[in-house]
Image (tube, rainbow, N blue to C red):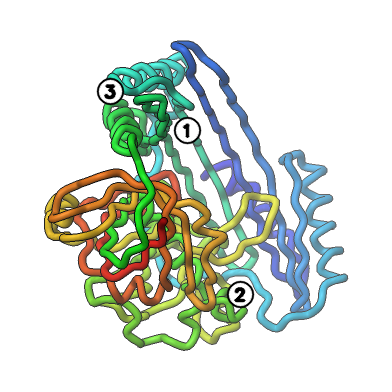
């Protein structure tokens, strides 16, 4: 048994009569290396561990945390959580998780190769990424950043109601931002390579993607206002999914902050849209076998064939809504109690490549990047307006690059107007995967 789980169980067993105790312990090791001019510009390596304790008694909830596992501090943290509960307002839905009979998925999210990777090897990856990006195209004039990032994460959750869960995960990625220059104009583009082990990271893929994104925007011009088909790059799709996933939580529904609140069982998207939250997918950068309350994670179909099928719940929102947890409790770390959120969103991919999808667009825009997306979306009405840049599509062919345009619609309209979903499922260093998405009849406001 993990030493973290042993400590968590021992602390949870100190519950007194009439109270529920949840103990969450985490240990994490992170590394970030940034290269510049063939050398290390910065190297950060950090280790942290800590404990969060939640106590529920008489429907009152208290929380406390500490950044050490020193025995005397553990005791003080439990006492402080009890004291905080005494000052809290009662809420009949407060409570810690109880076993629900779902076993954690049999997936391996830990790479010993990453744990054993030397600092010198991490530095070498960052430097090689910079070199490969500069060499990817003669128009690449410089690099904004080239970095290697990794994390080794362990956590344990125990309650006096029978929860005893442990997980350990690794993740790493390469990220580079290239600067392309021609005739005094500079454009930037980024590239990623994501994996659980450094062995699967692809320097060339990240470098070439960054160079392509930067160079194809050279010569970008303003475009006139039009209604057209937009083809969303996987990076843009992933950002949109993150926003949509946030409106499909029980917490958002209960607070009246979801455009889907009263639409369970209704058709809200094109039949080609099936949206899952599946943290048991090993390929997901944010995959995990247990959630923030110690329950097994599971795949949840949120929208199936365009129809709203489920909302995500942690224990609290599940009880308050009259349903149950979907294993979707998320935590900001040991310093905060759990909330509810999407963990690994993905659209079920289609069967056609991005090139095939673009070839069928007579007049459209490949949206490569958006700006101000999160601030430009109303999660209740679904209205959104965001700055965009990309490449025009004419007669199925990529045409001139454009800049300084705005695309506007509603999320509901966008989901209903999806024409096709690409086959290019791509996991990014975030809680959603991207795919190429073709959406008809979108307003592009330009000059």
> What percent of the width, then of the height, locates residue 182?
35, 25
> Between disc 3 and disc 2, whose residue precedes?
3
Q: Which mark is residue 136?
A: 3
Considering the numbered disc 3 on the image, is that residue within a helix, a strand or a loop?
A: loop
- Can you tell which quarter of the image residue 162 is in? bottom right
Q: Which residue lies at the image location 78% right of the left edge and 80% below the top edge?
A: 90
Q: Is residue 175 above or below residue 296?
A: above
> What percent of the width, then of the height, locates residue 102?
41, 68
Mark 3 touches mark 1? (CB < 8 Å)? no
Mark 3 touches mark 2? (CB < 8 Å)? no
- Residue nearest the viewer, comparing 404 with 291: 404
> Between disc 3 and disc 1, whose residue precedes?
3
> What percent of the width, then of the height, locates residue 343?
45, 58
Residue 8 left/right relative to 100: right
Residue 200 visible from this viewpoint: no
Q: Which mark is residue 150?
A: 1
- Can you tell which quarter of the image residue 405 is in? bottom left
Determine crowd level at label 2: few under 14, some 14-19, many 20+ residues with C-alpha closer than 10 A: many
Determine crowd level at label 1: few under 14, some 14-19, many 20+ residues with C-alpha closer than 10 A: many
Considering the numbered disc 2 on the image, is that residue within a helix, a strand or a loop?
A: helix
Q: Is residue 423 above or below residue 42?
A: below
The residue tagged 2 is 316
């Amino acid at each position: 048994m993990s030493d973290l789980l042993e400590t968590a169980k021992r602390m949870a067993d100190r519950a007194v009569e009439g109270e529920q105790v949840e103990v969450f312990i985490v240990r994490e090791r992170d590394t970030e290396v940034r290269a510049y001019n063939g050398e290390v510009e910065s190297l950060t390596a950090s280790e942290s561990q800590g404990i969060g304790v939640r106590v529920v008694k008489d429907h009152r909830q208290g929380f406390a945390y500490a950044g050490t596992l020193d025995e005397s501090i553990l005791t003080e943290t439990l006492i402080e959580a009890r004291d905080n509960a005494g000052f809290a307002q009662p809420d009949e839905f407060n409570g810690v998780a109880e076993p629900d009979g779902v076993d954690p998925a049999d997936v391996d999210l830990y790479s010993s190769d990453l744990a054993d990777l030397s600092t010198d090897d991490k530095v070498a990856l960052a430097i090689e990424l910079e070199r490969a990006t500069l060499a990817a195209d003669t128009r690449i004039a410089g690099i904004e950043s080239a970095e290697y990032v990794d994390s080794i994460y362990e956590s344990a959750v125990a309650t006096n109601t029978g929860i005893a869960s442990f997980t350990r995960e690794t993740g790493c990625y390469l990220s580079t931002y290239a600067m392309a220059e021609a005739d005094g104009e500079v454009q930037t583009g980024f590239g990623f390579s994501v994996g659980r082990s450094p062995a699967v990271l692809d320097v060339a893929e990240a470098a070439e993607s960054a160079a392509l994104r930067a160079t194809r925007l050279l010569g970008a011009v303003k475009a006139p206002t039009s209604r057209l088909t937009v083809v969303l790059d996987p990076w843009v799709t992933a950002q949109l999914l993150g926003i949509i996933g946030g409106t499909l939580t029980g917490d958002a529904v209960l607070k009246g902050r979801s455009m889907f609140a009263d639409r369970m069982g209704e058709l809200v998207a094109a039949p080609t849209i099936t949206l899952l939250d599946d943290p048991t997918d090993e390929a997901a950068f944010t995959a995990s076998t247990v959630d923030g309350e110690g329950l097994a994670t599971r795949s949840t179909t949120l929208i199936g064939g365009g129809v709203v099928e489920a909302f995500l719940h942690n224990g609290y929102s599940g009880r308050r809504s009259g349903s149950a947890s979907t294993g979707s409790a998320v935590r900001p770390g040991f310093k905060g109690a759990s909330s509810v959120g999407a963990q690994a969103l993905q659209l079920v991919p289609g069967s056609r490549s991005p090139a095939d999808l673009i070839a069928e667009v007579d007049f459209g825009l490949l949206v490569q990047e958006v700006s101000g997306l999160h601030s430009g979306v109303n999660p209740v009405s679904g209205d959104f307006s965001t700055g965009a840049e990309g490449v025009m599509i004419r007669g199925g062919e990529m045409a001139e690059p454009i800049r300084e345009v705005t695309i506007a619609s509603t999320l509901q309209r966008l989901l209903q107007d999806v024409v096709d979903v690409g086959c290019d499922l791509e996991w990014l260093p975030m809680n959603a995967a991207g795919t190429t998405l073709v959406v008809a009849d979108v307003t592009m406001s330009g000059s």
